[in-house]
Image (cartoon, rainbow, N blue to C red):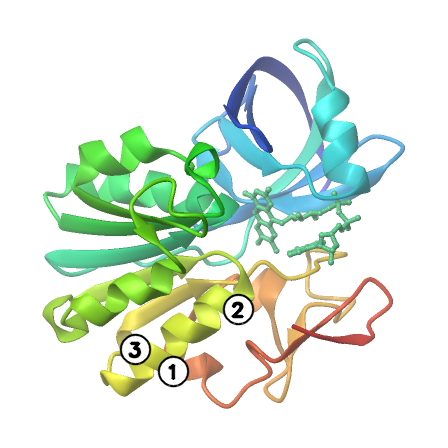
């Protein structure tokens, strides 16, 4: 699949570390699928669209820093959509989002709202100004926030909000965010016998994005995040490397 040229039509500052880049093309993805974004002369990186024509990016390293330097009228290459995406089902759903992990979940709640599915979102970030898409989640349903410093909502990890909920009361649970956060979600849904009804979107290091290089394979199944995921059922992730280690650019195991 060759990258398609996409021009940046608008850039929105979402938080101090996150920007949304609107593009002059429709990405045509299901929520949770991703595209490979080619930042010319730098790198090609995976991003899950946050709107039908936009990606929302947190600046963490070389490629995302280079993307942040682009202006309206500059262009990137887009390959995709790739992967499976979330499967929406049931009448009442719960979402647990951490940091930029809210990016693929915001379009999912909007699709759910259109289908009259009842939505509750637990949204976490380091601090109030880093909470992403608060308005979008609030207008789709019930929203509870958590921040590490207590500047908005519950003070502490967003997963602590799960203690107050009866997880079995939801038809389906969705989560995206830092893997340590998601592995705590997995422990809790496993305890509530809900692992098979919970979908996790994994943000692993992806190189080829077409299932060839194996960089994003998960032990012991060998499932590849890029083509078999990036969304996996909790049941698939139990007893895997998930939450314990991942692989870096050279394929070396890195403890989480
Ligand atoms: C399916 C998928 C969807 C994604 N969607 C989004 C999105 O919508 N918005 C967004 O901001 N990011 C998203 N990411 C993560 C994003 O791809 C990485 O942050 C990006 O590749 C980092 O590139 P870099 O060159 O700036 O940083 P690097 O220089 O490669 O790394 C900088 C730091 O970030 C860490 N890092 C690198 N890649 C990843 C990764 N894939 N996941 C977690 N940590 C990583 C490195 O370990 C290092 O600590 C997604 C990842 C995947 C796999």
Q: Earlier in the sequence, mark 2 or mark 1?
A: 2
Q: Could you classify mark 2 by the number of other residues whose Cα lies within 10 Å: few (under 14), some (14-19), or many (20 or more)?
A: some
CA separation, marks 3 and 1?
A: 10 Å
Q: Quadrant of the C terminus?
A: bottom right
Q: Secondary structure at mark 2?
A: helix
User: With 249 as the anchor, is 190 left or right in this view?
Assistant: left
Q: Which residue is mark 3?
A: 189
Q: Secondary structure at mark 1?
A: helix
Picture residue at 23% right of the left edge, 71% below the top: 163
Residue placed most toward the observer, 80 or 133: 133
Q: Position of residue 45 (x, y in %)?
A: 71, 45
Marks 3 and 2, the one that precedes in the sequence: 2
Which residue does the numbered mark 2 point to in the structure image?
A: 180
**Going from the N terminus, do you reach mark 3 or mark 1 first?**
3
Q: Residues within 10 Å of mark 1 (few under 14, many from 20)?
A: some
Indicate the position of residue 125 as horizontal and vertical percent values: 45, 47
Can see residue 30? no
């Amino acid at each position: 699949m060759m990258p398609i040229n996409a021009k940046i039509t608008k850039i929105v500052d979402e938080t101090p570390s996150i920007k949304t880049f609107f593009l002059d093309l429709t990405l045509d993805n299901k929520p949770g699928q991703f595209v490979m974004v080619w930042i010319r002369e730098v790198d090609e990186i995976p991003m899950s669209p946050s709107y039908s024509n936009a990606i929302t990016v947190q600046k963490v390293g070389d490629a995302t820093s280079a993307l942040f330097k682009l202006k309206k009228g500059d262009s990137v290459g887009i390959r995709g959509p790739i992967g499976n995406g979330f499967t929406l089902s049931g009448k009442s759903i719960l979402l647990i989002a951490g940091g930029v992990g809210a990016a693929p979940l915001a379009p999912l709640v909007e699709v759910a709202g259109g289908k009259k599915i009842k939505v509750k979102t637990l949204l976490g970030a380091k601090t109030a100004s880093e909470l992403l898409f608060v308005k979008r989640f609030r207008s789709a349903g019930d929203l509870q926030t958590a921040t590490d410093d207590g500047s908005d909502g519950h003070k502490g990890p967003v997963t602590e909000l799960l203690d107050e909920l009866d997880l079995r009361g939801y038809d389906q649970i969705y989560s995206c965010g830092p893997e340590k956060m998601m592995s705590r979600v997995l422990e809790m849904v496993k305890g509530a016998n809900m692992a098979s009804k919970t979908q996790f979107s994994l943000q692993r290091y992806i190189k080829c994005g077409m299932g060839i290089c194996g960089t994003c394979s998960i032990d012991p199944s060998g499932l590849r995040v890029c083509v078999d995921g990036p969304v996996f059922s909790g049941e698939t992730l139990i007893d895997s490397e998930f939450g314990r280690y991942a692989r870096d650019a050279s394929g070396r195991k890195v403890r989480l």
